């Protein structure tokens, strides 16, 4: 069952801070993507889909992998599990961002650090 984006906070500021262009930010701010998270053995797959673009990543916890983000950044990512929360870290061009994906009470809340952007997803 997909998670549907319900609202976001500081998302545009976060995208500006990591260098996402104006046109891409405008599209990202107006779409309501859905995300599907699947676990198959020790591999986790996250699919994010909207009317403009779809992305998919598959990874194993604790192992670095190459990722192309929805805004076309080429990053090195590593995802860990900390207290029941998925914690992806993305590194590119001397920059780094950490997300914390927390499940709770029918919501999926990713929070970016250090920018404090949050997106609230509901089943």
Image: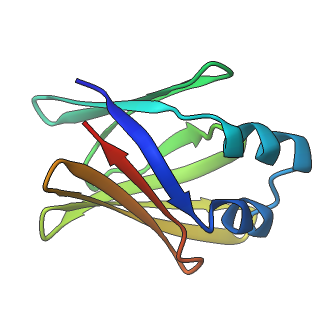
Tell me: residue 96, above or below residue 65. below
Which quadrant is home to the C terminus?
A: top left
Q: Give percent across and percent down for residue 46.
A: 36, 33
Q: Give percent across and percent down for residue 117.
A: 54, 68
* Figure disc tally: 0
- Identify the residue at horizontal 43%, vertical 45% (top origin): 6
- Colour style of the rendered protein structure: rainbow
Tell me: residue 76, above or below residue 28. below
Q: Give percent across and percent down for residue 57.
A: 43, 32
Q: Is residue 39 left or right of residue 64?
A: left
Q: Is residue 118 left or right of residue 71?
A: left
- Identify the residue at horizontal 69%, vertical 70% (top origin): 95
- Identify the residue at horizontal 67%, vertical 66% (top origin): 14
- Pick out the residue farthest to the front: 6
- Pick out the residue farthest to the right: 22
Q: Give percent across and percent down for residue 49.
A: 50, 24
- Pick out the residue farthest to the top: 51
Q: Quadrant of residue 101?
A: bottom left
Q: Is residue 26 visible?
A: yes
Q: Quadrant of residue 18?
A: bottom right
Q: Is residue 82 left or right of residue 116?
A: left
Q: Please state which of residues 25 and 9 is positioned toward the viewer in this rendering.
A: 9
Q: Is residue 14 left or right of residue 6?
A: right
- Identify the residue at horizontal 78%, vertical 47% (top origin): 25
Which quadrant is home to the N terminus?
A: top left
Tell me: residue 13, above or below residue 62. below
Q: Please state which of residues 86 and 12 is positioned toward the viewer in this rendering.
A: 12
Q: Please state which of residues 68 and 53 is positioned toward the viewer in this rendering.
A: 53
Q: Please state which of residues 85 and 74 is positioned toward the viewer in this rendering.
A: 85
Q: Is residue 46 visible?
A: no
């Amino acid at each position: 069952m997909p998670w549907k984006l319900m609202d976001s906070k500081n998302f545009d500021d976060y995208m500006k801070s990591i260098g996402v262009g104006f046109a891409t930010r405008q599209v990202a701010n107006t779409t309501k993507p859905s995300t599907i998270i699947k676990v198959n053995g020790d591999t986790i797959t996250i699919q994010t889909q909207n009317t403009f673009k779809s992305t998919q990543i598959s990874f194993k916890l604790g192992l670095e992998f190459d990722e192309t983000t929805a805004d076309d950044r080429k990053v090195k990512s590593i995802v860990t599990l900390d207290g029941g929360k998925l914690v992806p870290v993305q590194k590119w061009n001397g920059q780094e961002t950490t997300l914390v994906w927390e499940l709770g009470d029918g919501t999926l809340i990713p929070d970016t650090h250090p920018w404090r952007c949050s997106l609230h997803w509901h089943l």
